[in-house]
Amino acid sequence: MAFPTQQAMAYDRAATIFSPEGDLYQVRYAFEAVKKGWTSLGIRSVKGVVLAAEKRRLTPLLDVSDIEKIYKVDDHVGVAFAGMGGDGRVLIDYVRLVSVRHKLVYGEQATVEYLAKAVADVKQAYTQHGGVRPFGVALIFGGVNPDGSVKLYRTDPGGQYFSYKAVAIGMGDSFVNSFLEKMYREELSIDSAIKLAIEALFKSRVAAGEEKKEQLYPVFHELIEIGFVDRDEKMFKKLTPEEIKSIVKSMEPELLS
């Protein structure tokens, strides 16, 4: 009777072994690592793209001001991630090199899809070779292409990537995705998209039941990070802590209602 159990267990001993159901268990487990990551989201509109991410104080002495969840890839592209921080950092360093090489070889900026695909290709390769494991991280790429088109992509641990109008990843993804489905409008301005991102992250934290909104609101500006690319300027920018604090303060009625 022990044989079927041992046989079933064998399917998750390597990233290269398919189960009878067609699953790669190690890849499935990598998706679980993403679900345990801090929530990140992206919102695309006709005016540009906004990336936002939450940060959490795991211990009272942790300095969250030095934690980064949103990075600049190139002047016109930013990226946010959820999952294993080390995996995310390595992939972001890699895609920065891809962007620089493309510019040197072709004399123009890479498209957002080109960069997302480059990362997805690396992730896919790590699902079909022995001696390696899948990357336990999902990344959201947002930016404005050289032709002025605004794009938002999510890459998954299995090597897939998809284009989105708005998407969330991480532990609060179910709530945030449902919230964005109700509130998203394609004609959102950059300012409106930033406020929508803040509201989604705030209400996700409150809905999880970990904090009361009255306790979370005074410190929430310290626990989020926001970047954006305006379609006209085509430049990735990150909001300063002071700018985030000002926006959160202006949203007090919506957040505490």
Image (spheres, rainbow, N blue to C red):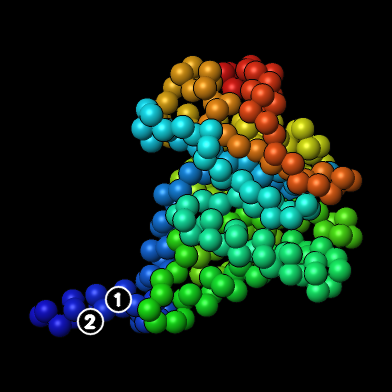
Tell me if mark 1 has few (under 14), some (14-19) or many (20+) residues whose alpha carbon lies within 10 angstroms of its own: few
Q: Earlier in the sequence, mark 2 or mark 1?
A: 2
Q: Please indicate whether residue 56 sits to the left or right of residue 238 in the image.
A: left
Q: Residue furthest left?
A: 1
Q: Is residue 256 above or below residue 179?
A: above
Circle number at residue 7:
2
* Residue 71 rendering spot, x and y as whole percentages: 64, 49
* Residue 6 rendering spot, x and y as whole percentages: 19, 79
- Mark closer to the observer (2, 1): 1
Q: Please indicate whether residue 94 sits to the left or right of residue 34 in the image.
A: right
The residue type indicated by label 1 comes to Arg
Q: Residue furthest front?
A: 104
| Residue at 80% in and 67% down | 103
Tell me if mark 2 has few (under 14), some (14-19) or many (20+) residues whose alpha carbon lies within 10 angstroms of its own: few
* Residue 186 rendering spot, x and y as whole percentages: 79, 45
Q: Quadrant of the C terminus?
A: top right
Q: Is residue 135 above or below residue 181?
A: below
Q: Quadrant of residue 3?
A: bottom left
Helix, strand or loop status at disc 2: helix
Circle number at residue 26:
none
Q: Quadrant of residue 211?
A: top left
| Residue at 77% in and 32% down | 191
Q: Is residue 129 visible?
A: yes
Measure how far apart labels 2 and 1 are at the Cα level.
Answer: 11 Å
Q: Is residue 182 visible?
A: no
Camera-nearest residue between 156 and 182: 156
| Residue at 46% in and 76% down | 127
Helix, strand or loop status at disc 1: loop
* Residue 77 rendering spot, x and y as whole percentages: 73, 54
The residue type indicated by label 2 comes to Gln
- Write down the residue under mark 1: 13
